Amino acid sequence: MWRITLPGLLAHKVRYALTAVAVSLGVAFMAGTLIFTDTIKYTFDGLFNDVYRNTSAVVRGTQPVTPDANFTNQRQLIDARLAETVRGVPGVAQTRLGVDGYAQLVGKDGKAIGNPAAGAPTLGEAWNPAADSMSPYRFLRGGRPPRTSDEVAIDKHSADIGHLAVGDRVTVLTKLSPHDYTVTGIVRWGTADSPLGASITLFELDTAERVLAEPGRVNEIDVAAEDGISQQEIVNRLREAIRDPNVEVVSGAAVIEEAQTGVHRALAFFDTLLLVFAAVALFVGSFLIFNTFSIVVAQRMRELALLRAVGASRGQMMRSVMGESVAIGLVASLVGLGAGVGLAVGLRSLLTAFGFALPSSALLITWRTVVVSMTVGILITLLAALMPAWKAGRVAPVEALRAVVVGEETHRVRRAASGALVLTIGSVLLLVGLFADVSQRINYVGAGAAALFVGVAVLGPIISRPLARAIGAPLRWHGVAGLLARNNAVRNPKRTSAAAAGLMVGVALVSVIAVMASSTKSSIGSVIDSSMRADFVVSGAGQPGGLSGFSPSLRRQVAALPEIASATGVRSGTVRIGSATTVVLAVDPRHVDDLFDVDVRRGSFTTMGDSGVAISQEVADSAHLSVGDPMPVAFATSGSKTYIVRVIYGARALAGDYVLPLAAARQNFSSKLDFQVYAKLAANVSPTVGRAAIERVLIDYPNGNLLDRTQYKHEQEAQIDQLLSLMYGLLGLALVIALIGIANTLALSIHERTREFGLLRAVGMTRSQLRRTVRAEAVIIAMLGTLEGLVVGTLLGWAVVVALKSQGITQLSVPVTQLVVVTVLAALAGVVAATAPGRRAARLDVLAAISHQ
Amino acid sequence: MSLKTGPAPVPEVVGRAVAARMVDGVKIFGSGATAVRALDGVSVEFAVGEFCAIMGPSGSGKSTLLHCMAALDPLTSGQVFIEDVDVQSLKDKALTMLRRERIGFVFQAYNLVPTLNARENILLPLTLAGRRPEAAWFESLVDGLGITERLRHRPDELSGGQQQRVAMGRALITKPALVFADEPTGNLDSRSATELLEQMRATVDDMGQTVVMVTHDPRAAGYADRVLFLADGRIVHELRGPTTESVLDTIRYLGD
């Protein structure tokens, strides 16, 4: 059969080229993601091995509760004097006291370096003069380690950003008040400028304990063993010598593995996100493949029938088409794999541009990447071609003698039934994923959405005829071009709707995201409006659950201003309640009512004290808790403690499910920082005066943004918009593929209509009229897909928003302006998609076209 | 076939206005050793109100003559005039306008746009020009063609004969200088063919329409005022006032 397949491919190579492009794009996206993350993992694995080369064991505080899936390790501090005991253990060659915590540099321009609220962390660490071979940091020529409490060394990445050099004075923000230091050296982390783009400040040991941890206490003691002593041996000896239930000893290998797992986890999210979009691209591409093969089979009806007439079997016919799809899938996947290498390079530069310092290394292309990319690419092509191939097998030999009739829909009822069935299955899966109590919700939602799309695509030929007629109605004013275009779009509803299907999926996903973002924004807006009593908030230093934030000195300074009536900091930490790990907030209960209206239903914040806890109505209902009941809270650093429920509130969107008293945070959170500071003006102080007063304090805290309620709302919205543009960017690929699909369909049907175009030209149609006809048809197809997508996407978005109600998204908002913009853009995109086919149609030689078979 | 020797007769029109003419038309396809002279110095005139048939064996150049006359294909050398307009000098846009305004076409098959109904197909040249049809002219035209009842039907709902009559309507709607018909009866049964030919004859007699028709069919040629016989790219014979029998005789005579 290959002898028939191959010439078939070559004869229709132009038709198949665009199909292959669609497959290639999806495969490239996937391969690029895999290559990129493999390379990063490999590079970091190597870096960690290098960095911990000389570390045989680590002595550190235990973690009574392990918060799962948390990159940041929160542990109890240990006594620095334990190092004496460690040094006394036989076989210990060297020890290094590890101290780390929040420290953020301020650049020459007065701006804080790094943005821990959105990107890589900013960390401070201790420099141990006696153990420099155990440190991951290497000084660049001309620098030396910090020796006094007035000196620091900084990483090269931060030095470059802040234009800082050895000898400069630099302000460093820590949990204490901001303080100036002299830069004595610039360091690199192994071979990288900094660890994953983190900003690093190295202090002399005592200073580090004071500004990052607590005086006399450290995070860990790293141990280098003498030659010939195994890691396990030294770990055993240390365990024997220490015998403290609050201290654990682990091997260097275990620490390397922890660090590697941490990076792998951090990348896993990124990995998954990109692969989801690669899947979307391939899904959209599969519509294109299906459509191309369907058209080509329809156009080759006579040829196929002739082959049947001279004795080819059904199976042979089917295998011939399948063979073509495999060949295309193979070539396209190979091309995609190659393009993926380029994409991986691009991803790296993109992340570098976003401020992540990624070590440069050769790209790692694993066999898994090759096998997975090729298999997926070929399988998708094969699957999409299955139906057309089956049709090819069903061509009756007698068709060879008949004139080719454009496939008229004969099984409307069957089609409607199967479409409705698939739609129902999709809806059920979707509803289960959104509302039922199941694990792996996202899988149900994803499968449900895919089924919905397929269902709409199956129903497409039925709904597209009236829809296309309606969309095309205004084109009547466009003269004969509009009339012809509309009639063409209606002529073969199967083809029109299949061409529009890809765009339908793309636009639907855009609409879902737009509806979700818009609803989230308006929900946040209404929460801020109804719950925030504070006049100002200082934010921008960190995220709930993160390592960074403001020194408590900021809150003290703001509270001390005569223009301010009250100010409170909000802290956060990771705790385990019941079986769930969750990020909770902690505030001073005395100030809550001044600054927030969290819709208190039972109890009062005035009675909360240091041992009370506030919980949301939802938690109270589901755990059957009421005011006065005890509730255990487990902390990573200090184990389980019991608090008494004192408040039950309704404003879950603002406060989350639990609010702890500040005292609990001081004692048990490893971070001693406020991630936000709220302030209320004193009576008779104008906002302008109050703002000026706080701004003066903030000069020393350049990591803070002072926002009033409206600005805070905008800041929150801006964060969502940022996420939104990333999503749109990733969906852009799917939309491009959808447009290629429209262009491909047009090209194929123009080829089929060569004689018709020749006739039109012969009786007096100008080239530009012909181009306009093709363009109008493309616009109709694009609008068809867009409208279907808008409807499906808005409904889907609505369902998701309803499902997220308990997560605080209470408002459904349909962003009409945005959706109108999408529609207009889709129409323009249709025009673009029609450019090449239109030009080809216009270039047709009239005489040749008339005599075209 | 043996060729008649001597100079080819130059068919000319005496005393009547000329609708179209070709002067020393040469059309060569391909180049070098494979070059084919499809037209080998053809000069011909078509008078206003004349129904002229062009006959000849396959490969004689009769279709090429029609295509070149109809401004669908440029000559290699020589000139074509449609109502004194030198077609060779026109660019694509002007040629398109010329075809739209001054020339009507009826092809052997695939004459109609499948997505347009009969009425829309007939009005196509006017619609393309953005012009409105004269109601009276349209009605008398479709009435004369006998398709008044079929105007709202799509081509696939019409018989072959009806399709060709719609095509005839489209060719005539602009009141063109010439109608070129390329084997218009080639796909029709004999009754439909007769009807179509009678209608073509009627447009010539009643409206003074000029029609140039390429055909294989001696019976179709019998409806013409004049028959030109082509062989090897030259006009080899001319027959005025032909009948089916005289055409057949001529073919036999030329074939000797």
Image (tube, coloured by chain):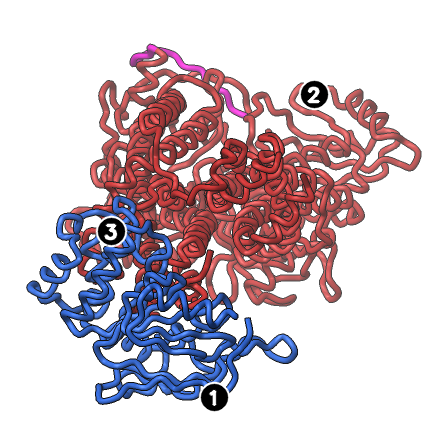
Chain letter of the residue beneath label 3 in the structure image:
B
Residue at image point 37% right, 16% down: A644
Could you tell whether B47 is left or right of B56 in the image? left
Pick the residue in front: A822 or A142: A822
User: Is residue B94 positioned above or below A638 on the image?
Assistant: below
Q: Which chain is blue?
A: B
The reply to whether dot 1 and dot 3 touch (C-beta < 8 Å) is no
Q: Is residue A468 left or right of residue B43?
A: left
Label 1 – label 3 distance at C-alpha: 43 Å
As helix, strand or loop, the secondary structure at mark 2 comes to: loop
- Residue B110 position within the rendered picture, expressed as x and y whole percent measured from the top left: 35, 56
The outermost residue toward the right is A228
Identify the residue at image location x=31%, y=51%.
Answer: B190
Instruction: Find out whether residue B218 is within the magenta segment.
Output: no
Quarter of the figure with residue B99 = bottom left
Which is nearer the N-term, disc 1 or disc 3?
A: 1
Residue A752: horizontal and vertical position, in percent? 43, 53
- Badge 3 is on which residue? B162
Report how far apart the C-alphas of labels 2 and 1 lie in the structure. Answer: 125 Å
Which residue carries the number 1 mark?
B7
Q: Which chain is red?
A: A
- Circle 2 sits on which residue? A244
